[in-house]
Image (spheres, rainbow, N blue to C red):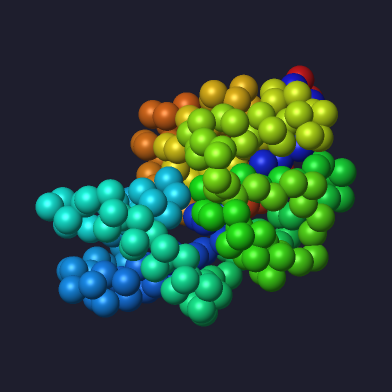
Amino acid sequence: MHFKAVCFDLDGTLLDSLADLANCTNKILLKRGFPQHPEEAYRYFLGDGAKMLMTRVLPEEARKETLIEECRQDFETAYRDCWDEQTVPYKDIPELLNALQKRQLQLTVLSNKPHEFTLLAVGHLLPDWKFEMILGQREGVAPKPDPAGMLEICQQLDIPSDAFLYLGDTATDMKTAVSAGCFPVGVLWGFRTEEELRDNGALAIVKEPFDVLDLLKQGNQH
């Protein structure tokens, strides 16, 4: 298959944002008198949007719809102030993006992070690359693993889904890629394990960003 485009997940794939997301969420829990969680635990809380993050971090007995929604709103307010304190692109991501642009592949981002923050993070931390489309979680559009966002990208760019490499670090990402008909690539520098990625449909696993270039060579030889 000749790949024409790459779709990236954001947190855990392009950006190492674990510390800021954990700190911000813990501040909300502290303010409301709930137990906080170690940073490492957030590897498994993240990936399915702000509402699901709040559901997972609250004690089970406190998971009432009204409180979850209040905490989600708290998160969006708090995150505006601390989203970029420690968040940076992963090592070799800038070089990978340079190499992909040189090969004239179209670059896109699909995240379950709220749309406002997805645009903000890409705009501030990855300003040197042209992303044809950047979509975060939006009102009225089902979040990943629903393929709606990915299919919207395919339609807008007029590129068939099977011409997309889809890079992500969670089961949610792999399920999204499979549902949309993209080529699912699991990345190991993010939040989850190789086992989880393979179990949820990853057709390739990359240990570091430059491994993506080898995949492209293989794909374009077929």
Residue 191 visible in the current orientation: no
User: Hey, which residue is sitting farthest left in the picture?
Assistant: 61
Percent across and percent down for residue 182 are 63, 27
Residue at 48 percent across and 46 percent down: it is 169
Q: Is residue 154 left or right of residue 84?
A: right
Residue at 69 percent across and 70 percent down: it is 124
Reply above or below: 60 against 3.
Answer: below
Q: Is residue 89 left or right of residue 41?
A: right
User: Hey, which residue is sitting farthest front in the picture?
Assistant: 66
Residue 176 visible in the current orientation: yes
Q: Quadrant of the C terminus?
A: top right
Percent across and percent down for residue 56 are 27, 52
Q: Quadrant of the N terminus?
A: top right
Q: Quadrant of residue 217?
A: top right
Percent across and percent down for residue 24 are 39, 72
Residue at 52 percent across and 54 percent down: it is 113
Total marks shown come to: 0
